[in-house]
Image: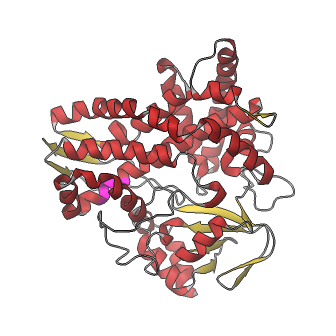
Amino acid sequence: MADALAAVMMLFSPQGQADPYPIYATIRETAPVLKTPFGLWMVTRHDLIDHALRSPAFRTPRGYKDADDPSGPPRFDPAGLLTVHRRNWLLFAQGDQHTRLRKLIMKVFTPRAVRALAPRIEALVAELLAPALERGSMEVIGELAYPLPATVICELIGIPPDERERNRTWGEVVATTVDPLCTNAQIAEAEVAMREWDAYLRAFMVERRRTPGDALIDALLAVEEDGSRLTDDEIAANMTFLFLAGHATTTGLIGNGLYALLRHPAQLAKLHAEPALVEHAIEELLRFDSPVQFAPRVAIAQTEIGGITIEPEIPVNLVLGAANRDPARYDRPDELDVMRPDPKPLSFGGGPHFCVGAALARFEAKAAFEHLITRTRSIELVTQPQFRPGLALRSLTKLAITIQR
């Protein structure tokens, strides 16, 4: 237990931020269900996490502070617009509200809608890669991994080209507050950004009601199920949620995945030799270094995980990154193997809160890797990259590479 508690503290160190997986292994082997010094539980075993993700005994924590919810984050202003949005995000919705919101959103965020984006995604990847291929070098995060999903989600929502950059800026500021390690200064900055973003979206909704089009915003304004429609608060909030969810995971998947391949050149060589493996390799890259590391949950009533009693309303962090490297689930879990027969990562969660944008993230990553693999002879790392600080979301700040065609 002492080793596990010491390992938890190591997650906050530069070593832990760079590579949390040996630390997860220590925790998983010594105390797979651990009460941390911060009062929350940490679960690191694959079978326990997989069960909890699907269990009706757990709910997602609220993303805002209510007087009757001790598990809610205390640093968010209950009256602030950031809280108004978080209260209506699908991510934090509970029970009947979640069922209703998800059903309405999934009516418009369909696999068919994602497939319809395929030609545009392919063209956008080619456009973003063209300058890098010409000069033989690239900063992958700023030139591909971030602008690809950010542009796609703007186009999907219906945001005009000349208004996308400020939406991206607002999104970057607000995204920092998703991680539990966000600072009070980041929360204050996000409140300011959300005031501007919310005002923009309300005006945008008024304009689209006046002159509707065929984008996601128009579908959200019109969607109905059994007489139920989305309110303006719900539409505005879930546009900000879809914007954040629509790019954060893909950015991390492309950056983390390419960095993993560069550290395992034999695996990269397999993809160069057989590009048809890319779609399967995406699952292994998600497993090996997941862009989403934690899935927070709260027990609805007293329950057990792995023989440990969990009291109601106490936060429980399901460590997806640890589950994806569990030797009880995967042979050679710390090895990258793009031909691994059965990856099935938990990186997009599971159960009723399975990520609504999973299909889109997978397709964007597939297009990016296919273009990188088929249009280059070699890709090499220039300098060791740095991971962004934080525990819940794992992504690189920069990834500089050289390319030979």
Magenta span: chief secondary structure: helix
Front in this rendered view, residue 376 or 317: 376
Image: magenta residue range:
256-260
Say which residue appears at 18% left-offset and 52% top-offset. 272
Estimate the x, y position of residue 396 in percent, counting from the top left: 39, 51
Say which residue appears at 65% left-offset and 65% top-offset. 54
Indicate the quadrant where residue 100 lies: top right
Tell me: residue 116, above or below residue 310: above
User: In the shown orientation, is residue 390 left or right of residue 385?
Assistant: right
* Quadrant where the N terminus is found in the figure: bottom right
Judge whether residue 385 can be spotted in this image.
no
User: In the shown orientation, is residue 15 left or right of residue 379?
Assistant: right
Indicate the quadrant where residue 158 lies: top right
| Colour scheme shown | secondary structure
Front in this rendered view, residue 174 or 246: 246
Tell me: residue 319, above or below residue 273: below
Estimate the x, y position of residue 44 in percent, counting from the top left: 55, 75
